[in-house]
Image (cartoon, coloured by chain):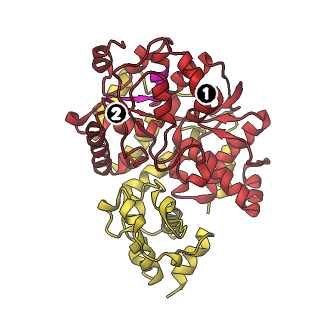
Amino acid sequence: MKVSYYPGCSLHATGKEYDQSVKAVSRALGIELAEVNDWSCCGASSAHMTNYRLSVALPARNLASAEKAGLDVMVPCAACFNRFKMAQHHLRENGALKKEIEEIIGESCRGDLAVRNPIDVFSKDIGLEKLAEKVTRKLAGLKPVSYYGCLLLRPPEVCEFDDYENPILLDKIMGAMGAEPRNWSCKTDCCGGSLTLGKTDIVIRLVDKLMTMAREAGANCLVTACPVCMANLDMRPREELRLPVFYFTELMALAMGLPGPTEWFKLHNTDPAPLLKSLALL
Amino acid sequence: MGAFLEEVNRRIDGVPIQRCYHCRKCSAGCPVAFAMEFNPNKVIKMIQMGKRAEVLGSSTIWLCASCETCVTRCPNDVDIARMMDVLREMVIEEGLDAREKKILKFHEAFLAGIRSGGRINEPMMIARYKMTTGDLFSDLKMGLDMFMKGKLSLISPKTKDMTSVRNIFDRTKK
């Protein structure tokens, strides 16, 4: 299977280990990734919070580029994924806007490409059984809670791929890796996102609550699919509440015996090595 | 009275906000409501009452994290997250004072980053934000740690066709 790949800005910096682990897992699963030609930033929260047309035009420039390749486009970053889906939604619903946006970006954009998150691609196109077959070292004793945050699933009529109040695909992927996912009620709660610089105190309060709830659920780590959630959960909670946080693809690579995890884990702020060593997983 | 409501509805271009019957599901589910001076449903009521200066001068509209929980749960499909975007746009377009200046400075630094290279270089974007807010020392250790780990680099690949990126900014400018 071959897909277009849109890494986005974070995956080249703070979310480096997400980019590398998505690539490693995709390769192992036989998914060929072709980077979207000459991509630019999706605009993230800052565009839609300040300028509506800019927030549609920036993703549309990338969608137009991906449409030329004609393949499904895989977007690991939750924020980029959301902006791509949202732009397509607006382009489909509003013909006048579509015309205007095409003039702004200087080319046509159909807005009908399948925009996919790797959670969706791995669990549906590859399938949980095949994922389980790839496991060489079960993640026994690892008890993650799945944390989707906001942007993968809301609004549901736009994001479409998993239940928006109680999503289950990440739990199932973790289960296929031999981990023991814990149930909790904060899967789609907000971490405060981009408020992390302008209003740090709000973000600390939100991530402290998430860590407390994860501990109450009996978890020993969290898994996420968003570089902003990762940064906030990994760096912002009060010291004594912190649990290790992983990109779900890092744990997949670990279970599948792929090279890379040891180096990626060194990039985390909250060191996951003690936990993984105690479970003989590292 | 009425003009403010009409303008907000026209900009949202969807479900009129007066369809709200104040069940407060939005405010109950809002992760940031604890820090807001007006809850989301109260903002709707204030717009209906024509309280333009109070709404556009509030911190609430900047604190909204756009998590979309409100619109997802609203029984009347009122797009409250979009309403917050619209209110912020009105402040910017009218040149009014943003009550939460640091949040607006962050967005400006972020967008300036895209305009200059097509892609965000995170350390440069944060440096730009810190220069304009004067908030130089918070998170310094965290940033240095990330540099030491090789996570952040001052140089990163840019978009090649920068003309098309700059055109987007020029053509969407108001």
Q: Is residue B154 visible?
A: no
Amino acid type, mark 2: Asp
Q: Position of residue B92 (x, y in %)?
A: 50, 64
Residue B7 drawn above or below residue B2 = above
Residue A104 drawn above or below residue A218 = below
- Which residue is painted at 79% across and 47% down in the image? A107
Q: Position of residue A50 (x, y in %)?
A: 52, 58
Q: Mark 1 lies on which chain?
A: A
Q: In which quarter of the image is residue B151?
A: top left
Amino acid type, mark 1: Gly
Give the magenta-colored segment's residue range.
A244-252
Q: In which quarter of the image is residue A244?
A: top left
Q: Does the magenta stretch include residue A248?
A: yes
How many neighbours does mark 2 have within 10 angstroms: few (below 14), some (14-19), or many (20 or more)?
A: many
Local secondary structure at mark 2? helix
The chain coloured red is A
Q: Which of A31 and B146 is in front in this view?
A: A31
- Which residue is painted at 61% across and 74% down in the image? B10
- Which residue is painted at 34% across and 33% down in the image? A234
Q: Is residue A281 visible?
A: yes
The chain coloured yellow is B
Q: Quadrant of the C terminus of chain B?
A: bottom right
Q: Sequence order check: which comes first, mark 1 or mark 2? A: 1
Residue A182 drawn above or below residue A34 = below
Q: Which chain carries label 2?
A: A
Q: Position of residue A34 (x, y in %)?
A: 69, 26
Q: In which quarter of the image is residue A93?
A: bottom right
How far apart are the alpha carbons under marks 1 and 2? 29 Å
Mark 1 = which residue?
A: A127
Mark 2 = which residue?
A: A234
